[in-house]
């Protein structure tokens, strides 16, 4: 390895590492904070909470969002909840247990120290959100209530109906608004980052496109924070928002930031199945539904055929003819196994021919038993808005017939490689939330994305970034007329000119859909060597076709959504290829990454700790060259590495 | 299914706009309204015409980005949905559908069906928050909140900030939007301290930005995709008056 990845994990016992780091980092005095500028890209939970907290500290913050308002960021769509080790239920939860569940759920591919810190600060997140006015669910005495999520045996999830992400985002957005009003944060809505600018190898600013005027603008700072979320939209059909993209992280990757574990993508088991060719996105149904809903397919293939021909209704199939396959295969966790396990089990049943809708790609999620046990009113209080949403979309009534669900791409655990301070391999460039890789390993547990985004933004980054900035206040303000900015802007301009000059016959969406099909087929729930090699070939071919045949209408200097999509698709090609290369290199099954060559006789995922217990960090070597793989070996000092077992 | 679409086209904020009619066919009844527009745009691009610009993002009814005025109603004919959750099965085959942006003096048009709703952000910046600093909070269960208050606060907090209330109101008032935020926080003990100040600052900002006054037509409640009740306007008025009288 030419480059040693320094994770900078503090010495000492697990529970003291964060305390030690906090004691070590240099502070910046209030008068110096005022002259230090920080750019935050993205206004989801991570970006908004970071910008608000940095603003409160007195830094000069600029925050950028591609939407018309920070409140649109896709964190808003998270439904189920946020984990915290409060032990309010007296069910023997603790920081250690949340840490352990997260490490195990991530299939032993995340960093112990980072995950422990996450569990450690989780409690303060709930405190802060309540103080912000987030209306979490309460009992009649006024205390907070909890529910359970997949992969755990305690109830530690706090929630606000099925709109937890929305409420937490409104909390962070409110704090952001408070700082905008105070003048510490300046917000740039409808601005998209186009490139990162480095001066002497340090992150010093960005080029952004004003999406209304179409003009390129330059912004300088002492540090840049990437909080732009994941890259799930590489698959075209996913639960991500239409505008979610991986372009900011790819711009950083091309400038030298390493991309870690790109192949770790989470496929969420409870999404509304694909309905037809014209579909533009998939809708998730919260995992919390698995608390009370039971997942099944018919035992008899005759029943499956009758269902597909609409000759019988699912409710008419008697109990003894139903296969509650998660309860059958994983008695200890039942319907609450982690997402990767639940998704693969659904695929296994559908591949065996038991899929229950016309496409054969759906299973049932049934509330009959829960309604009988709890009553309709209680079920409505817990899941009412989800039932309503399901009915609006599918035109079918979940109170009478079971819901139909199928797995879909949801979250990406991979992202920019960061050290313990959340700094990437580029000095002054930080990555937080879904955009980094550090906490979820090969699989993220439910209700942990919100926790991580807010932990990074409220409590971790504001401390660690100070250490870097403490050496920067004497440096002059970044000069955006410098040759580095000049050159970066020119490169972006050339990229756009090239797209407009193609004038082909194919729309951006039609090509993106084809990329999505390649990804889902070969880099989806189940992967093998032959398929992954084919994916790389097919992506290359499709990219060539894109540069020959794409049609980007109108001009740069106007509101042009087709141009935005085309620029993002260029990066999705590169991400898709990197995902396939990483998946090819990782010849084990692990978390969301299932290699067919590595499974047990019962078809369960088989990890290979001897050869693959590392973070794969990819370094860009230029457009036409293969990226170089660096390995950060994972050293488990505090937990015993085991095979995940949700059966006993 | 097939449709005739009468769509508002406007190059930018400065130029005048007009309706253009397009024909579209081969639409699946389960396609969403926005998916139908995606298909129309594909068709327009192939014909060398400019695609129709419209705001959208999550397409699951929660981000509040989509903002179309369809056949004279904000978010179209179905009740309690945003435009992205409206499906073509709600229309008659062959129907002519009129599509306009959300119109209001405070929401200038950017292009076609896209409007600038930055005024909403400005209202919230005026006081739509609890002034707590990261790190100051006490234990979450130290603030007890009666179940029903938490639920009522959550009802108000369900606002997605789409602007349907403003687009629907004949006065172009943002009272329901402002009330939802004020009420949501006023119902909680931790939001009470700044309640009066908040109500006054947000109402003043709303007036300054060119939104109209509320005349209690309740049209906003009818068209709100999240069903937010006008009773929150009553609570806003109470908070506002209390603050005035305490001067």
Image: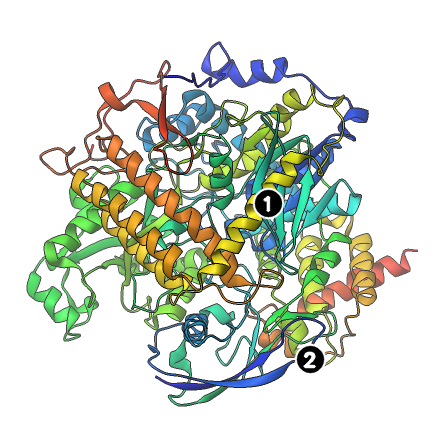
**Can residue B57 be seen in this snapshot?**
no
Q: Is the residue at mark 1 from the same chain as the one at mark 2?
A: no
Residue at the spot 61% in from the left edge and 57% down from the top edge: A211
Residue at label 2?
B16
Q: Mark 1 belongs to which subunit?
A: A
- Asked if the residue under mark 2 is in contact with the one under mark 1, i.e. CB atoms within 8 Å, the reply is no
Helix or strand or loop: what does disc 1 sit on? Answer: helix
Residue A556 x %, y %: 58, 60
Q: Nearer the viewer, mark 1 or mark 2?
A: 1
Out of B7 and A601, give the one closest to the viewer. Answer: B7
Task: Give the CA distance from mark 1 to mark 2.
Answer: 34 Å
Kindly give the residue lying farthest to the top in the view shown.
Answer: A12
At which x and y percent is residue B16?
69, 80
Residue behind mark 1: A490
From where the camera sits, is residue A262 visible? yes
Q: Chain of mark 2?
A: B
- Rendered-image quadrant of the N terminus of chain A: top left
SS type, badge 2: loop
Crowding at mark 1 (Cα within 10 Å: few <14, some 14-19, many 20+): few
Left-right relation of B1 to A76: left
Residue in the image at 46% along x and 56% along y: A566
**Rendering coords of residue A432 (x, y %):** 53, 35
């Amino acid at each position: 390895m030419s480059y040693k990845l320094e994770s900078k994990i503090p010495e000492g016992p697990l529970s003291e590492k964060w305390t030690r780091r906090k004691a070590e980092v240099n502070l910046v005095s209030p008068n110096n904070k005022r002259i230090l500028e920080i750019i935050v890209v993205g206004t989801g939970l991570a970006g908004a909470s970071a910008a608000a907290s940095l603003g409160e500290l007195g830094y000069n913050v600029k925050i950028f969002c591609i939407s018309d308002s920070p409140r649109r960021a896709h964190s808003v769509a998270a439904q189920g909840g946020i984990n915290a080790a409060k032990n309010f239920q007296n069910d023997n939860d603790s920081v250690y247990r949340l840490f352990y569940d997260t490490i195990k759920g991530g299939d032993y591919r995340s960093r112990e120290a980072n995950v422990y810190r996450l569990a450690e600060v989780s409690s303060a997140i709930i405190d802060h959100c309540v103080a912000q006015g987030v209306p979490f669910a309460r009992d009649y005495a006024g205390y907070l209530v909890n529910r359970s999520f997949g992969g755990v045996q305690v109830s530690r999830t706090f929630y606000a109906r099925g709109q937890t992400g929305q409420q937490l985002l409104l909390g962070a957005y409110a704090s952001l608004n408070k700082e905008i009003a105070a003048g510490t944060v300046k917000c740039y809505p409808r601005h998209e980052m186009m490139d990162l600018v480095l001066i002497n190898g340090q992150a010093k600013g960005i080029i952004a496109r004003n999406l209304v005027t179409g003009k390129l603008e330059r912004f300088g700072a002492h540090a840049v924070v990437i909080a732009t979320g994941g890259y799930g939209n590489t698959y075209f059909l996913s639960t991500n928002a239409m505008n979610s993209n991986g372009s900011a992280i790819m711009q950083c990757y091309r400038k030298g930031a390493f991309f870690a574990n790109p192949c770790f993508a989470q496929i969420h088991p409870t999404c509304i199945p694909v309905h037809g060719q014209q579909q533009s996105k998939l809708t998730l149904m919260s995992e919390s539904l698995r608390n009370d809903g039971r997942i099944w397919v018919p035992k008899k293939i005759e029943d499956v055929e009758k269902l597909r021909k609409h000759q019988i209704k699912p409710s008419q199939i008697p109990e003894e003819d139903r296969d509650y396959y998660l309860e059958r295969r994983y008695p200890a966790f039942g319907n609450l196994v982690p997402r990767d396990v639940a998704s693969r089990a659904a695929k296994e049943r559908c591949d065996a021919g038991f899929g229950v809708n016309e496409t054969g790609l759906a299973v049932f999620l049934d509330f009959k038993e829960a309604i009988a046990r709890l009553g309709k009113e209680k079920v409505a209080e817990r899941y009412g808005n989800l039932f309503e949403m399901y009915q609006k979309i599918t035109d079918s009534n979940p109170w009478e017939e079971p819901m139909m669900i199928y797995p879909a791409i949801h979250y990406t655990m991979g992202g920019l490689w960061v050290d313990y301070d959340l700094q990437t391999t580029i000095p002054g460039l930080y990555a937080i939330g879904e955009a980094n890789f550090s906490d979820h390993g090969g699989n993220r547990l439910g209700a942990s994305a919100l926790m991580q985004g807010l932990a990074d933004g409220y409590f971790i980054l504001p401390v660690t970034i100070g250490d870097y900035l403490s050496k920067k206040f004497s440096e002059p303000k970044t000069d955006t007329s410098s040759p580095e900015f000049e050159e970066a802007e020119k490169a972006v301009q050339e990229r756009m000119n090239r797209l407009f000059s193609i004038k082909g016959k194919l729309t951006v969406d039609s090509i993106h859909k084809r990329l999505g099909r390649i990804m889902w087929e070969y880099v989806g729930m189940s992967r093998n060597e032959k398929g992954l090699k084919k994916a790389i070939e097919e992506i290359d071919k499709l990219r060539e076709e894109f540069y020959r045949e794409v049609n980007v209408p109108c001009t740069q200097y106007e509101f042009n959504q087709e141009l935005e999509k085309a620029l993002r698709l260029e990066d999705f090609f590169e991400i898709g290829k990197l995902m396939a290369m990483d998946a090819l290199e990782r010849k084990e099954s692990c978390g969301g990454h299932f290699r067919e060559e590595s499974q047990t006789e019962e078809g369960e995922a088989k990890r290979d700790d001897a050869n693959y217990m590392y973070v794969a960090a990819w370094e860009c070597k230029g457009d036409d060259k293969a990226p170089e793989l660096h390995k950060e070996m994972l050293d488990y000092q505090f937990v015993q590495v085991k095979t995940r077992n949700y059966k006993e | 299914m097939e449709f005739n679409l009468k769509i508002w086209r406007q190059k930018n904020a400065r130029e005048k706009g007009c309706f253009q009619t397009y024909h579209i066919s081969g639409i699946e009844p389960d396609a969403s309204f926005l998916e139908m527009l995606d298909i129309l745009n594909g068709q327009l691009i192939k014909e060398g015409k400019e695609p129709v610009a419209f705001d959208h993002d999550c397409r699951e009814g929660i981000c509040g980005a989509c903002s179309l005025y369809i056949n004279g109603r904000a978010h179209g004919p179905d009740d309690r949905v945003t435009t992205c959750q409206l499906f073509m099965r709600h229309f008659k085959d062959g129907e002519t559908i009129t599509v306009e942006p959300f119109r209001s003096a405070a929401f200038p048009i950017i292009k076609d069906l896209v409007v600038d709703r930055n005024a909403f952000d400005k209202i919230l910046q005026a006081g739509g928050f609890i002034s707590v600093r990261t790190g100051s909070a006490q234990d979450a269960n130290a603030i007890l909140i009666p179940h029903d208050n938490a639920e009522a606060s959550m009802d108000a907090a369900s606002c997605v900030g789409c602007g349907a209330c403003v687009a629907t109101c004949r006065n172009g008032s943002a009272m329901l939007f402002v009330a939802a935020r004020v009420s949501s926080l006023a119902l909680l003990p931790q939001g009470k301290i700044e309640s009066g100040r908040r109500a006054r600052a947000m109402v003043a900002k709303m007036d300054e930005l060119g939104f109209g006054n509320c005349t209690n037509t309740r049209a906003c409640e009818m068209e709100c995709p999240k069903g937010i009740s006008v009773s929150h306007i009553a609570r806003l008025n109470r908070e506002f008056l209390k603050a005035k009288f305490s001067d």
